[in-house]
Image (cartoon, rainbow, N blue to C red):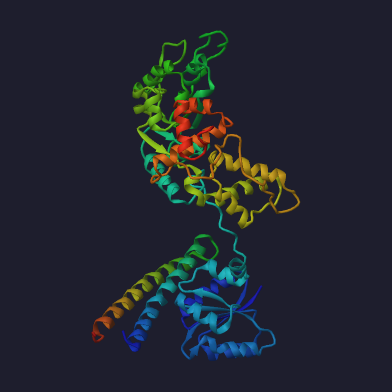
Amino acid sequence: MLTVLLVDDDPEFTDVACTIIEFLGHEVLTAANLAEARDWLKKETFDHILLDFMLPDGSGAHLFDELELLAKRPRVTLITGHPSVRGIIKDLCGPNIDYLVKPIQREEIEAVLSGKKDGKASEEEPPAITRHFEHLIGESAPMQELYKLIERVSKTSANVMLLGESGVGKEVVAAAIHQASDVEGPYIATNCGAFSKELIGSELFGHEKGAFTGAVGRKDGVFEQAEGGTLFLDEITEMPIDMQPNLLRVLENKVVIRVGGSKTIPVNCRVVSATNRNMEEIAQSKVLREDIYFRLAVFPITIPTLRERKEDIPLLATHFINELNAENGTGFMWQDTQLETLQAYDWPGNVRELRHFVHRAAIMSDPEKSNIELPKSIESPFAKKQSTTPALQAGRTIEDVEKELIFATLEKVNGNKTMAAEMLGISTKTLYNRLHAYGEISKDD
Amino acid sequence: MTESELSELAKHIHDARKPLNRISMQAELVKMALNGDVPTDKAIDALDKIITSTKDCSDALTGLMSALSESPSE
């Protein structure tokens, strides 16, 4: 229990404030002006003074010097009408003073009396990493754009096709779309590339008992399982082309017939499909029928690669290490220079590669320490070698590029000119002529 | 705006904020009454005072408005 002196000239305010402070378990006395406050200070000792800044007989600040002379100096909380006054008072009286800004709420009184307000200001926790739609991490412009698209499409029931390189997080985006949509049904994910031609029909549409050898019971397909929810079809372009008419029929008629069955079952779910091929590739390679494409890609979304949003790398790396810390009870922390190293790399395997890399680094590091040991170089067997010389760029002459190509080819075949000429699709004679022109070989050669 | 006009303005704003602070505190009292922390009749009393304060606040804003329109324009 504290003994509190409340100094304020508004009797209605002090009246209610007293009720609240007493309810909080403290003893409270009131003064309407500086003179009354001085009187109380002579008679009583206080643990805490709540002091209005503007009083009829002067500013509350006049009391400060007198408080210094007391045997037991009470804690002081200034009540001000305007937030800007805070700055001025801070300069006058140092940082060891709390403030309440009118209009005041009960929680604020509670906080200053318990001294919690102090603690909150001094040891603020680092800002938590926001998970957009409970799944996605990143504050970069390309991600903000993605969030906007997800927000928009979540309001509709349109089918979404997610395009993006391997490892960008297509499944995570699909889950985010499901999260953003206000639907009651479940989120069901399946991989069209993971099933044999024979089994994919059963996986998608279900089967009746005895439909084929081994069909010992009835099975619901994923379309039925996702009723009223979201069905995620990963690697849609890996689906056998002769199965696609069946899929088209479901998408058009919104009914499925189980394998070996005859009854039509109505289905109602949003289909989110994904592929790591880009639109041109889909169109040219004929892995997906055009009619299916238009049914699935009512709203196509291209997910940005990690190298297009490098500013998110520290955020993601921190999130991954936090996850691992929580899992293994470690306390690993990134150093700024390490995050810069991660940011400099191009991550051809995208977020998946980054996650894998962080995991590996955490395993390599001493679990007793907070320091993370980074391998000397970041590379994965799947990463395309990053050439140090800039690739084809506008502004270079054809001659230049031709020369580079010839030398690169020669290097590859250990200088064998016949093989190099064959690879380049020119005659050996032409190759010799070029090399002469570059001054690489003399006529005698 | 001159120094004196500014302090005049500050006075009016102070007058408008005073009832707002009362409203905030009385509302806290109503919350406490609904929780059963203080007697219910206190809540009725507090709500009446809130209504009075809204009028006071409105009056203060009217005062501010007329003070602004009376001040000599530059």
Q: Residue at x 65, y 75 (%)?
A: A2
Image position, residue A344 (x, y; %): 55, 50
**Residue A268 vertical position relative to residue A90 in the rendered view, above or below:** above
Q: Quadrant of residue A76?
A: bottom right
State the residue in front, A247 or A187: A247
Tell me the quarter of the image containing the N terminus of chain A. Answer: bottom right
- Residue A53 position, x and y percent, is 50, 83
Placement of B39 over or under B6, stated as above or below? above
How far from the left and from the top, in percent, is residue A292?
37, 24
Is B55 placed left or right of A257 in the picture? left
- For image coordinates 56% across by 37% down, the residue present is A383
When the figure is inspected, residue A298 is found, relative to residue A350, above or below; the finding is: above
Q: Position of residue B24 (x, y in %)?
A: 45, 69
Q: Quadrant of residue A229?
A: top left
- Does residue A60 appear anywhere in the picture? yes
- The image shows a total of numbered marks equal to 0
Looking at this view, is A299 or A278 the one in front? A278
Q: Which quadrant would the C terminus of chain A be assigned to in this image?
A: top right
Q: Nearer the viewer, residue A374 or A258?
A: A374
Residue A253 position (above or below residue A307): above
The answer to whether residue A174 is seen in the rendering is no
